[in-house]
Image (cartoon, rainbow, N blue to C red):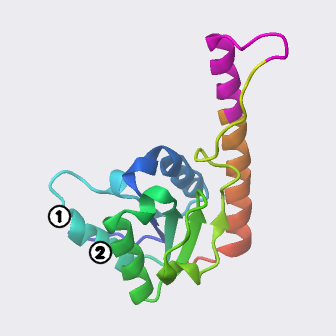
Amino acid sequence: MTRKNYKIFASYSRQDEAIVAPLVELIRISGTNVFRDEDNLKPGDRWVIEIASAIKRCQVVLVFWCIHSSASKAVASEYRRGVNLGKRIVPILLDNTAMAEEIGQYQGIDLRSFGPHVQHPRLGFADRPMTQQERELATSRMEQQLRQKMAVFVRDWLKRNITIDT
């Protein structure tokens, strides 16, 4: 089997898949080849071997860091492998969880103010509480605005900070 080279490897906790998957898609829009387990592993693949190989062949390891990833043995194994191989490590901060010592020395991207880990302010009107329909509409609008802000932020950050050899 011919193995593909990836520019970026995405390391994250499965509990944060709903956050990470759209961010990876935003990065892919720029034409960057990203390895994310759910997108690249196929039934029957020996996932431990494939992940180790993808890290070896990538240039950058993005570590989506939060309370979930800090407790994940798989995430720890992935970022440690990247550090040991001399890869460029970029922590993506999703909440206020202290970074592991091995990756705390790397400059990261702070997405804490954007994130789904952040509690949204209580929604309501001065004269009455919001109906379920109003709450769903407001939440949908907030999520759409969040996605738009995140897309611009990630695109601009990538342009400024990630030089990827082609």
Viewer-side residue, 97 vs 158: 97
Crowding near the residue tagged with mark 1, few <14, some 14–19, many ≥20 C-alpha atoms within 10 Å: few
Amino acid found under the numbered disc labelled 2 = Ala
Residue that badge 2 annotates: 52
Would you say the magenta stretch is mainly helix, strand or loop? helix
Residue 51 in the image, given as x and y percentages of width and height: 30, 68
Report the side of 76 relative to 161 (left or right): left
> In this picture, is 83 found above or below 157?
below
Crowding near the residue tagged with mark 2, few <14, some 14–19, many ≥20 C-alpha atoms within 10 Å: some
Q: Does the magenta stretch include residue 24?
A: no
Residue 28 in the image, given as x and y percentages of width and height: 54, 56
The answer to which quarter of the image holds residue 95 is: bottom right
Report the side of 143 relative to 41 (left or right): right
Which quadrant is the C terminus positioned in?
bottom right
Residue 15 in the image, given as x and y percentages of width and height: 41, 48
Q: Is residue 127 magenta?
A: yes
Amino acid found under the numbered disc labelled 1 = Arg
Task: Tell me the residue at 48%/58% (across/down).
Answer: 67
Q: Which residue of the protein is positioned furthest toward the right in this rendering?
A: 126
Q: Give the range drawn in magenta.
A: 125-142
Viewer-side residue, 19 vs 66: 66
Task: Tell me the residue at 26%/68% (across/down).
Answer: 50
Q: Helix, strand, or loop for circle 1?
A: loop
Residue that badge 1 annotates: 46
Task: Tell me the residue at 22%/63% (across/down).
Answer: 47
Residue 12 shows in this picture:
no
> In this picture, is 107 found above or below 134?
below
> In this picture, is 152 found above or below 140?
below
Mark nearer the N terminus (2 vs 1): 1
